[in-house]
Amino acid sequence: MKKIINISDAPKPIAPYSQAILANGTLYISGQISIDPYTGNLNNDSIKTQTQQIMSNIKAILKETGMDFSNIVKCSIFLSSMEIYSEVNEVYGNYFPENPPAREAVAVTGLPKNVDVEISCIAVK
């Protein structure tokens, strides 16, 4: 059984996908970009600002399902360039002070709305 997660405290999907799917105690969070859920605008002032907005969006989705960052077991980080890797890690690392999840970080040729960072996650209750 799966439950579709779509909340107002996270950005509305910009294509045919759900913000997240909860299935058998596992939460699959779709790739989040730096959209402010309340204005619908990109929050692109800096790489750190983008990453902070993404993590805030993920936090809202986790909270909706009674989870937090400690429930995340896997993240995928997509970057416009590996040159921004350390700035993303600086913000990202604040959310996982102990026992960080498994993850990969890869540079890609393009991301939705030409952002520099996109992060997806898997969390388990």
Image (cartoon, rainbow, N blue to C red):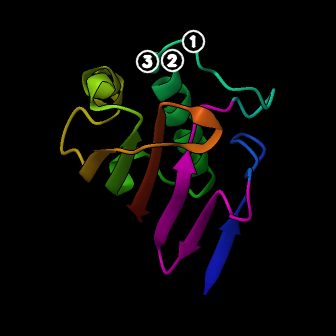
The residue identified by callout 3 is 48
Q: Please determine whether, in this image, residue 8 is positioned above or below residue 55.
A: below
Q: Please determine whether, in this image, residue 109 is positioned above or below residue 42.
A: below
Mark 2: secondary structure: helix
Furthest toward the top, the residue is 45
Q: Are marks 1 and 2 in contact (CB under 8 Å)?
A: yes
Of the 4 image quadrants, the one containing the N terminus is: bottom right
Crowding around mark 2 (Cα neighbors within 10 Å: few <14, some 14 to 19, many 20+) is some
- Distance between the alpha carbons at the discs numbered 2 and 3: 4 Å
Q: Please determine whether, in this image, residue 29 is positioned above or below residue 43.
A: below
Lateral position of residue 105 relative to residue 33, left or right = left
Q: Are marks 2 and 3 in contact (CB under 8 Å)?
A: yes
Q: At 69% from the left edge and 70% from the top edge, which residue is drawn?
A: 4
Residue type at mark 1 is Asp
Q: Which residues are magenta?
A: 15-35
Residue type at mark 2 is Thr
Of tags 1 and 2, the one toward the viewer is 1
Q: At 57% from the left edge and 12% from the top edge, which residue is drawn?
A: 45
The one nearer the camera, 53 or 85, is 85
Residue 57 image position (x, y, % from top left): 59, 38
Q: At 68% from the left edge and 42% from the top edge, which residue is drawn?
A: 10
The residue identified by callout 2 is 49
Q: Quadrant location of residue 108?
A: top left
- Distance between the alpha carbons at the discs numbered 1 and 2: 6 Å
The residue identified by callout 1 is 45
Residue 77 image position (x, y, % from top left): 37, 45
Of the 4 image quadrants, the one containing the C terminus is: bottom left
- Distance between the alpha carbons at the discs numbered 3 and 1: 8 Å
Mark 1: secondary structure: loop
Residue 94 image position (x, y, % from top left): 31, 26
